[in-house]
Image (spheres, grey):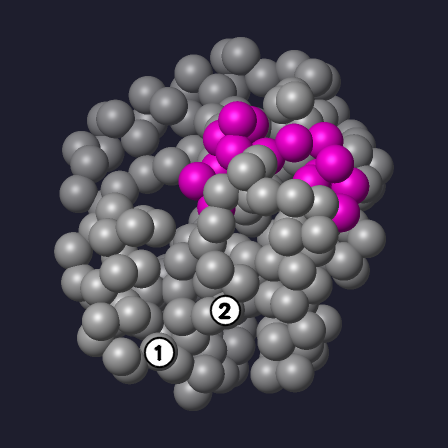
């Protein structure tokens, strides 16, 4: 709708990062309401069962206690239920700290793995999600790798059309345990503060 300028009402899109096993339960709940989501996967963790590797990843990369991750069979379940799968890089690294070659390896490696398992992925979200964790060169490389969209975790919404390669999608970071009033607050504030500049990448 943003690409085509069809912003004629209030729309909400739901997505999940990292590829945790709990995404299966989230998908089941969403399906009860006829809602489809996009699940962004850290491809190196899909199907990972080594407890030490998982523990290190959870501690160093996503700052969570030990959790399970989706398998490729789980990913098939999500797709068969009508959900979409995107890339969250290969290893969940801070791309702003990598060389251009390192960023290419993260982007293209994840793209190729996803293409092997599910076909060409369309969507990408960068780890940690803030503008300081990314840069303009990284943004360009996302589209060169073959992705059609690039999503942040910077709060906001979109009220104007944009070309694919200039649109940096804004997303609200939300935890399931938050009071609903907190979520309404952020959504309302985003709506009040939305303007054309929200469409573009505003980092270094």
Picture coordinates of residue 3 (x, y %)? 78, 41
**33 falls in the magenta region:** no
- Left or right: 56 in relation to 9: left
- Left or right: 28 in relation to 80: left
Residue 32 lies, with reference to residue 201, above or below; the image says below
What is the quadrant of the N terminus in the image? top right
Residue 37 badge = none
Q: Residue at x 53, y 63 (%)?
A: 90
Picture coordinates of residue 32 (x, y %)? 34, 66
Picture coordinates of residue 40 (x, y %)? 50, 59
Residue 53 lies, with reference to residue 150, above or below; the image says below
- What is the magenta range? 127-141
Which SS class for mark 2? helix
The disc, 1 or 2, on the residue closer to the chain's N-terminal end is 2
Residue 43 badge = 2
Residue 48 badge = 1
Which SS class for mark 1? loop
Q: Which residue is drawn at 81% across and 53% down?
A: 144
Q: Badge 1 local density, few (<14 within 10 Å), some, or many (20+)? A: some
Name the magenta segment's main secondary structure. helix
């Amino acid at each position: 709708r943003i690409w085509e300028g069809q912003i004629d009402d209030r729309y909400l899109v739901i997505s999940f990062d990292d590829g945790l096993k709990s995404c299966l339960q989230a998908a089941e709940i969403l399906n009860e309401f006829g809602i489809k989501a996009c699940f962004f996967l850290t491809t190196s963790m899909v199907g990972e069962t080594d407890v030490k590797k998982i523990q290190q990843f959870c501690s160093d990369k996503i700052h969570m206690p030990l959790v399970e991750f989706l398998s490729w069979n789980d990913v098939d379940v999500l797709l068969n239920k009508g959900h979409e799968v995107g890339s969250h890089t290969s290893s969940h690294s801070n791309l702003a700290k990598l060389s251009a070659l390192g960023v290419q390896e993260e982007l293209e490696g994840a793209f190729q793995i996803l293409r092997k398992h599910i076909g060409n992925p369309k969507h990408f979200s960068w780890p940690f999600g803030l503008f300081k964790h990314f840069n303009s060169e990284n943004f360009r490389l996302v589209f060169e790798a073959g992705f059609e969209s690039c999503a942040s975790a910077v709060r906001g919404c979109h009220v104007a059309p944009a070309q694919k390669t200039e649109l940096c999608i804004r997303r609200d970071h939300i935890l399931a345990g938050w009071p609903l009033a907190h979520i309404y607050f952020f959504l309302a504030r985003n709506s009040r503060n939305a303007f054309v500049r929200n469409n573009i990448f505003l980092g270094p």
